[in-house]
Image (tube, rainbow, N blue to C red):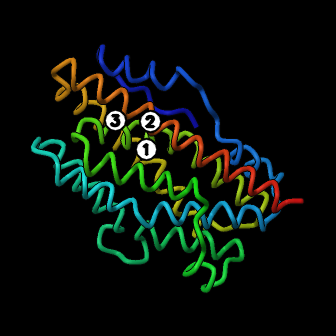
């Protein structure tokens, strides 16, 4: 699935240039989509992903707390409401991530006690740091572009691969499918807000640096997880 075309201005072009500086495609996605990884290795991926999802509402809440712009507040409030399943506990994104892990064979004990990789912890900690300590423009560049922008492009195809090669149902992969439409809208609106609110050279440079750091940390997480998955497959 192609990411929807988004019209944007000169500064956001600079942010997209940052994303093109060190192009990276998560090898786990292709391995799962093609069915190359055994089920146990895919379960490992789902459990590590679940650990990140558990904290995602904290990232959004922290940005909201640091944000004075009303349009941005509205977007963040909507994002948080969607993460919590719009009030439906069964559609809460963490609940959906646990369902995905269970569908791949994870036990309740594994779900409750699974240990993060060091790189998973680094990823979570960077997200907490940038959303708590940086400006909301830096945070939205890191989260809205560094994370959410990429999800619709990959998650739809990943859900299809899990259904085709691992026998999962549409309900099992709902955590992935809900992000196809929701995060497309989030990233588009985040771009509009960043373009409007990044009104000084200092703010723009900080936003670009936050995005660079997010991409580097996320890459470290993805590469470490893929290596662990390969070891699991041996």
Distance from the alpha carbon under mark 1 to that under mark 3 = 10 Å
Q: Is residue 95 left or right of residue 234?
A: left
Viewer-proximal residue, 233 or 150?
233
Helix, strand or loop at disc 1? helix
Helix, strand or loop at disc 2? helix
Q: Which residue is mark 3?
A: 141
| Residue 184 on image: x %, y % | 41, 41
**Vertical relation: 14 (above or below) 58:** above
Task: Please tell me how many numbered marks the rendered image carries.
Answer: 3
Q: Is residue 219 left or right of residue 85?
A: right
- Residue drawn at 79 percent across, 58 percent down: 165
- Residue drawn at 29 percent across, 73 percent down: 87
Instruction: Check disc 3: other Cα within 10 Å, few if <14, some if 14-19, many if 20+.
Output: many
Q: Residue furthest right?
A: 234
Q: Which residue is mark 1?
A: 148
| Residue 234 on image: x %, y % | 90, 59
Q: Which residue is mark 2?
A: 213
């Amino acid at each position: 699935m192609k990411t929807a075309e988004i019209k944007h201005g000169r500064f956001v072009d600079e942010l997209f240039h940052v994303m093109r500086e060190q192009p990276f495609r998560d090898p786990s996605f292709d391995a799962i989509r093609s069915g190359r990884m055994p089920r146990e290795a895919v379960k490992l991926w789902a459990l590590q992903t679940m650990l990140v999802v558990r904290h995602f509402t904290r990232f959004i809440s922290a940005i909201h707390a640091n944000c004075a712009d009303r349009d941005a507040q509205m977007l963040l409030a909507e994002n948080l409401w969607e993460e919590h399943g719009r009030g439906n506990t069964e559609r809460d994104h963490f609940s959906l991530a646990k369902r995905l892990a269970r569908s791949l064979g994870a036990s309740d004990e594994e779900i409750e006690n699974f240990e993060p990789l060091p790189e998973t912890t680094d990823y979570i900690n960077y997200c907490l740091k940038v959303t708590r300590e940086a400006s909301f423009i830096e945070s939205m560049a890191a989260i809205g572009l560094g994370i959410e922008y990429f999800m619709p492009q990959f998650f739809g195809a990943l859900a299809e691969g899990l259904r085709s090669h691992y026998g999962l149902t549409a309900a099992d992969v709902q955590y992935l499918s809900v992000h196809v439409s929701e995060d497309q809208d989030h990233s588009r609106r985040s771009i509009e807000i960043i373009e409007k609110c990044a009104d000084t050279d200092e703010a723009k440079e900080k936003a670009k640096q936050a995005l660079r750091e997010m991409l580097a940390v996320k890459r470290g997480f993805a590469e470490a997880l893929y290596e662990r998955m390969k070891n699991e497959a041996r």
